[in-house]
């Protein structure tokens, strides 16, 4: 278990990060990056601060060496601006009844603090590392990652080597039918934008002949879309773990989201007056990993082919899924089971986009929490008021990650002891 000094240090790092306002917009991550750099450099860890624009700073550091695939500890340090409804100041890290309140408490400065602490503890431990442990705290994740992972992937791809990644998006607990489940994101949906506009001028006085009427009919066709479920490795495991039961609403919603593509109308503005200007409908399509452009085209043709509209499909951002046979994923399961034997890890698909999409392979969204803040409550707090985490969950998550890292850096070489490793790290 973490000792008293480790807990104190972790709590101090976390509350200090919360007290730095890194709201995006405007996206000033420089102060948070400087704080992180000071912690790492104070332990003799070299740090690179990388930025595409002034004050849009990303932190890169690494410890260890070796030829085995590295482990990347990834998080973002920007947060969405706090709106109204808060009972506590959003950037003061107020502690009350074992809970810590503040913007970024679960999205995602808790993970940043866990990963910083684990890096410091590994450095001090003297444990021989058989690979690099990379810490990457990024800018701009909340606004598209153009100044963060998008910039790094384009300008510094050498800093994103193939290995294993701990990222955001999972670690939250649900219960159903006496079974406790902790989520781990093992993939994301792909996404593209689509614009739809009427094909020609009105042919008559009827409302359905106007440009607005044509778009309304197109909207009705889009709303009638019922995608068929499509399974991937993580969702097959999801089904097996829950035994095909969906008694808890959150479990059911996660299953529906993870197995069905979603065509949504993002924005529209209609002019009903004859001859008035007509802006196109803006759609987004979030689709299951493995979906091809041809499939997207065929779907739209089936929905809108009989409508008097034209549409344009933007570039496709591919989805991804990650293997559940990865020794690193199994190490995360093993460490979680050691500390919380009654809870099973539940693979899921990320609810939205994360920086993991720039890496795509062996990316596991996992900042494990206890059941004291259930997933249904987490969903209300992300980007909402009174975001918080319990101190117990903060300590628990850091210890799971630390144990998984210790178990990984001393793992046998590829091909040695693999069957034993698979058995010991199972999620049963």
Image (cartoon, rainbow, N blue to C red):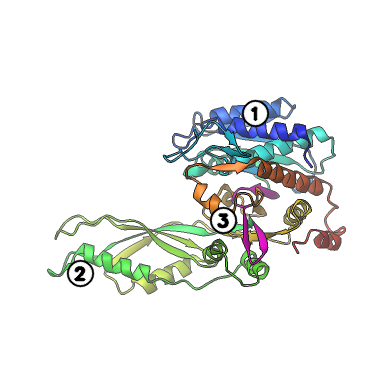
Q: Position of residue 326 (x, y in %)?
A: 73, 58
3 or 1: tag closer to the N-terminus: 1
Asked which quadrant contains residue 342, the reply is: bottom right
Q: Is residue 250 left or right of residue 70?
A: left
Q: Is residue 366 left or right of residue 222?
A: right
Number of residues whose C-alpha sits closer than 10 Å to that of mark 2, classed few (under 14), some (14–19) or many (20 or more): some
The answer to which of 179 and 32 lies nearer the viewer is 179
Q: Position of residue 104 (x, y in %)?
A: 55, 39
Asked which quadrant contains residue 112, the reply is: top right
Magenta highlight range: 164-182
Judged from the image, the secondary structure of the residue bearing numbered disc 2 is helix
Q: Position of residue 175 (x, y in %)?
A: 63, 61
Tell me the CA gap for discs 3 and 1: 29 Å
Rendered-image quadrant of the C terminus: bottom right
Tell me the CA gap for discs 2 and 3: 39 Å
Q: Is residue 182 left or right of residue 306?
A: right
Q: Position of residue 103 (x, y in %)?
A: 52, 38
Tell me the CA gap for discs 1 and 2: 61 Å
Residue wearing tag 1: 37
Is residue 174 found inside the magenta-colored segment of the image?
A: yes
1 or 2: tag closer to the N-terminus: 1
Residue wearing tag 3: 350
Asked which quadrant contains residue 123, the reply is: top right
The answer to which of 140 and 313 lies nearer the viewer is 140
Of circles 3 and 1, the one toward us is 3
Judged from the image, the secondary structure of the residue bearing numbered disc 3 is loop
Residue wearing tag 2: 208
């Amino acid at each position: 278990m973490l000792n008293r000094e480790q807990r104190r240090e972790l709590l101090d790092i976390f509350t200090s990060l919360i007290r730095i306002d890194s709201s995006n917009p405007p996206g000033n991550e420089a102060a948070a990056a400087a704080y992180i750099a000071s912690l790492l450099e104070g332990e003799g860890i070299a740090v690179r601060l990388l930025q595409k624009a002034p004050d849009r700073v990303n932190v890169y550091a690494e410890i260890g060496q070796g030829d085995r695939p590295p482990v990347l500890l990834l998080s973002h340090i920007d947060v969405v601006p706090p709106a109204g409804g808060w009972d506590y100041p959003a950037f003061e890290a107020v502690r009350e009844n074992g809970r810590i309140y503040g913007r970024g408490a679960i999205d995602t400065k808790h993970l940043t603090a866990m990963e910083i602490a684990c890096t410091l503890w590994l450095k001090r431990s003297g444990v021989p590392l058989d690979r690099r442990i990379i810490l990457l705290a990024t800018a701009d994740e909340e606004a598209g990652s153009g100044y963060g992972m998008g910039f790094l992937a384009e300008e510094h791809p050498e800093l994103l080597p193939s290995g294993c990644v701990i990222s955001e998006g999972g670690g939250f607990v649900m219960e159903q039918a006496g079974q406790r489940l902790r989520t781990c994101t093992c993939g994301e949906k792909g996404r593209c934008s689509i614009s739809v506009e009427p094909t020609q001028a009105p042919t008559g006085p009827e409302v359905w002949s106007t440009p607005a009427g044509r778009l309304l009919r197109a909207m009705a066709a889009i709303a009638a879309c019922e995608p068929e479920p499509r399974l991937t490795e993580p969702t097959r495991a999801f089904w097996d773990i829950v035994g095909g039961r969906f008694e808890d609403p959150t479990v059911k919603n996660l299953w529906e989201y993870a197995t069905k593509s979603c065509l949504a109308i993002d924005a529209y503005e209609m002019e009903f007056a004859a001859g008035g200007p007509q802006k196109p409908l803006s759609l987004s399509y979030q689709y299951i990993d493995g979906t091809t452009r041809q499939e997207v085209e065929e779907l739209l043709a089936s929905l809108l082919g009989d409508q008097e509209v034209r549409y344009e499909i933007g570039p496709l951002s591919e989805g991804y899924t990650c293997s559940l046979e990865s020794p690193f994923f199994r190490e995360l399961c093993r460490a979680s089971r050691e500390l919380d034997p009654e809870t099973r890890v539940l693979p899921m698909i990320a609810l939205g986009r994360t920086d993991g999409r720039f890496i795509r392979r062996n990316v596991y969204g996992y900042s494990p929490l206890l059941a004291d803040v259930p997933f249904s409550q987490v969903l209300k707090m992300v980007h909402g008021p009174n975001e918080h985490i319990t101190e117990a969950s903060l300590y628990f998550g850091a210890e799971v990650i630390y144990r998984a890292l210790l178990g990984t850096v001393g793992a046998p070489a590829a091909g040695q002891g693999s069957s034993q490793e698979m058995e010991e790290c199972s999620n049963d």
